Each structure stands twice: as structure tokens, then as C-alpha cells.
Amino acid sequence: MSFAGVELGGTKCVLTLATGPDDVRERAVVATASPGETLAWIERVLGRWKANHGIDALGVASFGPIDVDQSSATYGNVLSTPKPGWAGTAVARRLQRVLGVPMAFDTDVNGAAMAEMQWGSGRNLVDFAYITVGTGVGVGLIVAGKPIRGFGHCELGHIRVRRLPGDDWPGSCPYHQDCVEGVASGSALRARYGENLDKLGADDPLWDNVAWTLAQLCHAIVCAAAPRRIAIGGGVMERQPHLLEKIEARLIESLNGFIDLPGDGPFIRRPGLGSDAGPLGAIALAMQAKR
């Protein structure tokens, strides 16, 4: 079999032809530009792969918010996004027409969570959460083996949490100011502290604020869904791996003995697939579509 995956990110788009991390047959990357340019490029690559290799299913893991309600007239569309030109763009149905194969469409972070459960830090679990901390903050929340659904998808990166005492910076989210994304994302940190974050030491007070905020997010996830593990990835975490221990310590402190975290090892872990969690997330979605 052969599965095609499209990870449509706000900064770049990664196409993968694979059956898993040990069988990646093709990969193509392009900067995410206008919808017309980007989708036309995706169509060309998918068309070539279909002709040369054959494709059994397609997975599309997109930045959001997106419409994931299959009964909706706008299913597969990007919804209200600050990315210029993309609001209202039809993605899923357009790409499915290119291949004419089974397709799954979900958020990029839900895809990453499913990939981690298939091949990474969430293996053998059916209740799992994946957090990405990069340009924004996204959460893939999997309960009983499936991404949670309501009228939309999970947007826990935009919840408001308790602020670190003494911190009154208003936040940078254009919708909510001091939600988790508005305080702890890479774009928020650059807006507040400038572009030289990588030059700051692990003991800089800035990271205490980030760890505090992300621990509050984890506290909400634990109380709401009780996942058996949380993995945290994304560019900020890749460059600042010391944050994992700080977040777990802050989470335990915040829970204050009310809930005991499961497992013998750390509850909060780095993604087992590293930066491949996103691209392979689209492959995991494609495999799910074929079942």
C-alpha cells in the first residue's frame, strides 16, 4: 500500500508518501504562500505520485481553525485564521478530487497526536494528548482512540489560564490577548522579548513564565480528559528541552495531590517522532481513512 500525507502548516507545507517512519518513499516541502499557489503545487505533486507510485488513501493535517464536520457544507475548509487569504479556503474536497481515494481531514496537531500513538511516545495508549508550542500553541486531544469532537475541534491553546503572580503583560493573541498562545507561543515570546530567545540561558526567568503557563494548560487537560500521557513538541520545545521537567514539576505542584499522574516514568514527554510527528501525522490520518 501507499499513503499520501499533506501537512499544511502556516509556514510550510510538507508532503509525504509513506507507510510509516521506516518507509518514507517521497517527501516534498514548499513554503505556504497564497491558497492558489500552495494548493496548485500540492495538486501537481500528488498527481505525479499517483501516476508513478499509486496512492491508496490521503491524509490532510491542516493548520486551523478548520471545519471537520462532514455534514457541513464547508467541511474541509479553513475557517477564521489570521493567515492572510486563507480564511474560507476549501482544502479537503479540492485535494480529494485530485486523487479520488479515501481521505481523512483533521488539524495538524490531531494528526501529530495520532502519529505519536501509532509510532512514538503514545504507543499502546488510547487516551493521549499532544501539545505543540511553536508559532502558536495547539493541542491534539485523543480520547478512546479518537480526536474529541463537538461542533468543532479542540482549541485548548486558546484557553485563559492563571497568570504567574506578578506578570501583567497583556498578551499577543489577536483574539484573546493572554490565552496560552498569547503568552507562551514562540510568536508571543518574540513580541515580548525580541528575536534573540535562543541566547537566553535555561535559568532565565522567562522560562519560568513559559513553564508556568504550559503547566496550567496541562492541568486543564488532565482535569478534563485524564490522558495517560502528554507529549509536548514544537519549535520552542525543541530549542528549550529543559522546559519539560519544569512543566511537569509545575503541573504536580498545581494539582496539589488531588490527582495522581499515571505511569512509572515522566508523565510529560518529548515526541518520540521529533519534528516528524507533523508530516507523519498526515500519514496516520490516511491510514485511518483506509480502514
Image (cartoon, rainbow, N blue to C red):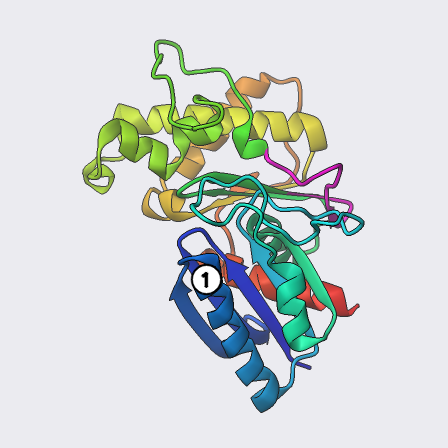
Q: Position of residue 95 (x, y in %)?
A: 62, 67
Asked which quadrant contains residue 98, the reply is bottom right
Is residue 88 at all visible to an observer of this figure? yes
Is the residue 128 above or below the residue 60 in the image? Answer: above
Is the residue 178 above or below the residue 109 in the image? Answer: above
Name the residue: 43% across, 35% down.
245
For the view shown, which residue lies furthest in the bottom direction?
52
Asked if residue 142 is among those painted magenta in the image, a careful observer would answer yes
Give left or right: position of 180 versus 172.
Answer: right
Is the residue 271 above or below the residue 40 in the image? Answer: above
User: Which sits in the foreground, 246 or 179?
Assistant: 179
Asked which quadrant contains residue 164, the reply is top left
Is the residue 172 above or below the residue 77 in the image? Answer: above
User: Which sits in the foreground, 100 or 183?
Assistant: 100
Main secondary structure found in the magenta portion? loop
Name the residue: 23% across, 42% down.
198
* The N terminus lies in quadrant: bottom right
Asked if residue 191 is among those painted magenta in the image, a careful observer would answer no
Q: Which residues are magenta?
A: 141-155
Q: Which residue is mark 1?
A: 13
- SS at mark 1 in the image: strand
User: Which sits in the foreground, 237 or 87?
Assistant: 87
Residue type marked 1: Cys
* The C terminus lies in quadrant: bottom right
Q: Position of residue 99 (x, y in %)?
A: 66, 76
